Amino acid sequence: MAKSQHTKISREPEIFGYIRVSTREQNIDRQLLAMEPHCIPPANLFIEKKSGKNFERPQYRQMLRKLRKGDLVIFCELDRLGRDYNEIIEQWRYLTREKGVDIKVLEMPLLDTTYYKDLLGTFIADLVLSVLSFTAQKEREKTLQRQADGIAASKAKGVVFGRAPVEVPDDFEAIFQLWRSKALSGEQAAKLCGFSLKTLYNLTAERRAEEGF
């Protein structure tokens, strides 16, 4: 009698896209346009309209449940992945190591785990994430200290503050370094920071004046 044979049907990897917009940035068209060339099936495109401070994201959790080893998740920007760099690194490692999926960040070509499928690729991604996290934290600490010192000095001179200060993102230093090394254009750097190119130039000039160069 012939033995019955069971044919194992392999599952083809799928492509997923995740879009998040905050309450102040409700327009998803920019992110949709960036993902369009990647032919993501509509059922695999997850759109979240939540503040970064509120990380209870039902669409993100639903996407996690659908992901299988070998799948690819596309984000437009790195900050779509988490509310801060600690969260971003935690989610990155969860997706790549525990879920076994690839990640592609469209705004940062170095953060693409499909480019290298070996230890070098993992090393590059981990290195970039670690550098971004470290520089963002250090720059935030320095910025807060410089702001406090500058305000104290100005108040001592009788200066009255009327214009609201520009809100600088936590990852400004990391973005600035990528811009200075020409890995990002000025327009890309300004967009990642959430302000105009003119504001980026003004902040750079102010920082140079503060640091004496």
Image: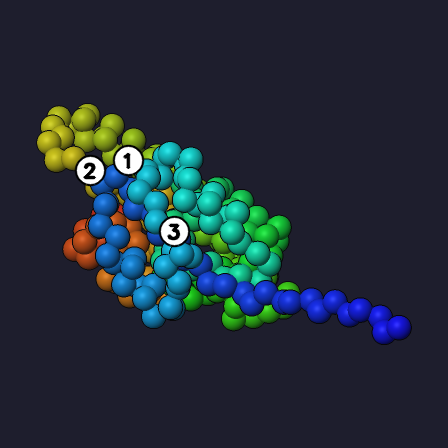
Please give the name of the residue rendered at 25% of the width and 58% of the height, measured from the top-left corner.
30
Q: Tag 2: Cα neighbours inside 10 Å, few (<14), some, or many (≥20)?
A: few
Mark earlier in primary sequence (1, 2) = 1
Residue 182 horizontal/vertical position (percent) = 34, 67
Please give the name of the residue rendered at 62% of the width and 50% of the height, measured from the top-left corner.
98
Viewer can see residue 178 = no
| Residue 121 lies in quadrant | bottom right
3 and 1 marks in contact (CB < 8 Å) = no
How has the structure been colored for display? rainbow
Q: How many angstroms separate mark 2 from mark 3 (CA)? A: 34 Å
Quarter holding the C terminus? bottom left
Residue found farthest to the bottom? 2
The residue where tag 3 is placed is: 46
- What is the secondary structure assignment of the residue under circle 2? loop
Q: Tag 1: Cα neighbours inside 10 Å, few (<14), some, or many (≥20)?
A: some
The residue where tag 2 is placed is: 165
1 and 2 marks in contact (CB < 8 Å) = yes
Residue 88 against residue 72 in the figure, above or below: above
- What is the secondary structure assignment of the residue under circle 1? helix
The residue closer to the viewer here, 27 or 155, is: 27
Left or right: residue 212 versus residue 80 is left
Quarter holding the N terminus? bottom right
The residue where tag 1 is placed is: 147
Please give the name of the residue rendered at 31% of the width and 42% of the height, measured from the top-left corner.
49
The residue closer to the viewer here, 33 or 212, is: 33
Q: How many angstroms separate mark 1 from mark 2 (CA)? A: 10 Å
- What is the secondary structure assignment of the residue under circle 3? strand
